[in-house]
Image: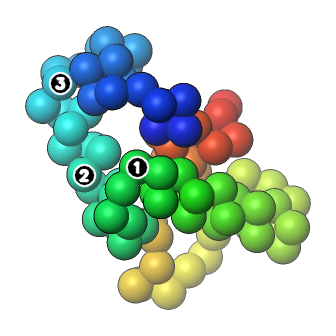
Amino acid sequence: MLAAGLANKEIAARLNISDHTAKFHVAAILGKLGAATRTEAVALASAAASSSFKSRGSFLPLPCPRRSVPNLPGIMFLAGVGER
């Protein structure tokens, strides 16, 4: 949804959640990816998806060190990368 350029209000409407909740989740995605902007978050999620598909050939959660991104499939879904 971030990749589609949707605003928090539009994300909230699509997911049937409050605007505040959408804003919270977008901020969490940016923080977990270490991204300063939505564009950077989409680029990072896309790069992570590309490398996970090459190495594992699937959309399953990756075993990863504690400091890396948790719930990568969920983040990629919200970011609009490899939508399910």
Q: Is residue 46 left or right of residue 44?
A: right
Q: Position of residue 8 (x, y in %)?
A: 28, 29
Q: Is residue 78 left or right of residue 36?
A: right
Residue type at mark 1? Arg
Q: CA distance from mark 1 to mark 3?
A: 16 Å
Residue highlighted by disc 2:
27
Residue located 67% across and 64% down the image? 47
Residue located 76% across and 69% down the image? 51
Residue located 27% across and 44% down the image? 25
Residue type at mark 3? Asp
Residue highlighted by disc 3:
19
Residue highlighted by disc 1:
38
Give the answer, above or below, for where 80 lies relative to 32.
above
How many residues crowd mark 2 within 10 Å: few (<14), some (14–19), many (20+)?
A: some
Q: Position of residue 12 (x, y in %)?
A: 29, 21
Q: Position of residue 55 (x, y in %)?
A: 84, 73
| Nearer mark to the viewer, of 2 and 1 | 1
What element does badge 3 sit on? helix
